[in-house]
Image (spheres, grey):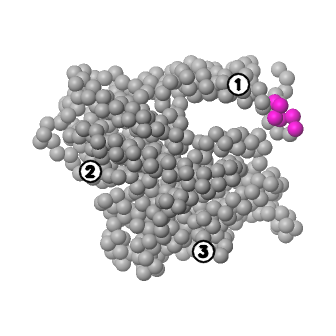
Amino acid sequence: MPTPPLAGGTAGPAALRPLIDTVLTALHDGAALRDGPLPAGGPDTVTPRTRTATHPLIPDHGTGAHHALRALVTALTEGAADPAHPHCAAHLHTPPLALAAAADLAASALNPSMDSWDQAPAASALEADLTTALAAEIYPHAPSPDAVITTGGTEANQLALLLARERHGPVQTICATNAHHSVARAAWLLGLPEPVPVPAPTGTLDLAALDEALTHLHRPLLVVATAGTTDTGEIDPLDAIADLCATHAAELHIDAAYGGPLLFSPTHRTLLHGLDRAQSVTLDLHKLGWQPASAGLFAVPERHHLAPLHHHAPYLNADDDTEAGLPDLLGRSLRTTRRPDALKIAVTLQALGRTGLADLIDRTVATAHHLADLITKTPGLDLYDRPTITTVLFRPTNADDHTVATLRRTLLNRGHAVLGRAHATDRLWLKATLLNPHTTPEDLQALIDLVTTTAADLVTTTGPDPATTTGPDPGVTTTGADPGTPSTSTDPATPTLIPPPTTTPTPTTPLTEGDTPR
């Protein structure tokens, strides 16, 4: 076998071109085989089919580039949950723009490593300009705002707690029960006290409870607010929280991983009023920014706030090299080797401009409101609330939590729709997180029809639906009941899907979806 060609250099594009054509054909063929938002049959069907199609992964003798690409890309595509399908709407799992994916190909072919200037001369300059520009969007009145690229909200939130610890020592974090799970995980990783939870009875942080907590807790304190929760998509009262932090001499970090891109929409940016009062902000453009993962950002109002991230490794940032003018990149991340994720973001922003990105955001928010309108007009469905961003919660009227969970799994296992799940007001709801700007009113009506007809099927089913027995859903007990909800059947194979009128759900603590891509 001849030595395989490389992707870079002047010969690289010629070697890539036929391979890309093979990949594009495999992407098309796999999607046609799937013919829906995700493959039907659940893990008991998808896993063995994928293994059969890709076996052996390490053969004694290679099959060749085109055969391997066809086989594995087709198998992966056939078995994918496709966020570009209008009925794939469970999570903050965006359908990436084609131009962003194309830019990502260039990043992979060039393969600059963002840990030293001599590995990424132009990419380091582009990243520095992009992070400064995005930080200025968040902190328009700060003299020297800056940001670093992250893998997403989880890493950015960890940086927030790390830098607060470096400034003040073992800070006590305070966050609402609606906060993302990464806040508690960051405290654990950094050896900080467990975050103090503040109630969010209406989906957003309770200001009176925060005031009380700030009054009685010992300093130093770091409050974490959320602009776009993963369960209901709501935004905490940022300005009022910033006022309380100022009164009690506490610092404020805002996790705007979901809602942050609203800054680019003149129509919706007022929802983020007070964002620039935080000591740090998390932003993700692989959510409401349509970038391939990952495309996270951690922003601060003053560049020197990032100084504690500096790290010295003589082979990457020798003192004499730095003194001679070579940029020191190690202080731009906790990671060493990392991809030039700035490229796809910069291409997208330049191609679309402010107005183009605002149009995508406004279209998607309007789509969520249209879905809410359809739900309110559909007999047999209940809407949780009007969407704040693009998250819509709904459920069949009079259904118990077990019915809602079973309905969701049935749609998944039949390959008809990908809907999420969220707890609010002590009940389980179906969650549609709309991020596809191409979704039409007809797509939404079709989704509503799928939900209502499937719910009706479940109510009239006398035996178990094979599509609902492929495996337990996370958070559901072995009897099939949702946590905190009494089972209405002693036989897990034949659940009673509509409970007797006397059934009263046991109150549960609102949960944040832990499987949301961050």
Q: Nearer the viewer, mark 2 or mark 1?
A: 1
Q: CA distance from mark 2 to mark 1?
A: 50 Å
Answer yes or no: do the residues labelled 3 and 2 have beta carbons within 8 Å? Answer: no
Residue that label 1 marks: 22
Going from N to C along the chain, the mark reached first, 1 or 3, is: 1
Residue 12 located within the stretch drawn in magenta:
yes
Residue 163 visible in image: no
Residue at the image point whose x is 40% and y is 67% from the top: 237
Q: Badge 3: few (under 14), some or many (20 or more) residues near its Cα, within 10 Å? A: few
Q: In the orientation shown, which residue stands out farthest toward the left?
A: 502
Vertical comparison of 385 with 319: above or below:
above
Q: What amino acid is labelled 3 in the image?
A: His
Residue 83 visible in image: yes
Q: What amino acid is labelled 1 in the image?
A: Thr
Quarter of the image where one finds residue 57: top right
Answer yes or no: do the residues labelled 2 and 1 have beta carbons within 8 Å? Answer: no
Going from N to C along the chain, the mark reached first, 2 or 1, is: 1
- Which numbered tag is attached to residue 211? none
- Which numbered tag is attached to residue 426? 2
Q: Nearer the viewer, mark 3 or mark 2?
A: 3
Q: Is residue 333 left or right of residue 448?
A: right
Q: CA distance from mark 3 to mark 2?
A: 42 Å
Vertical comparison of 412 with 97: above or below:
above
Residue at the image point whose x is 53% and y is 58% from the top: 265
The number of discs equals 3
Q: Secondary structure at mark 1?
A: helix
Residue at the image point whose x is 74% and y is 24% from the top: 65
Quarter of the image where one finds residue 121: bottom right
Q: Secondary structure at mark 2?
A: loop
Magenta highlight range: 10-15
Going from N to C along the chain, the mark reached first, 3 or 2, is: 3
Q: Secondary structure at mark 3?
A: loop
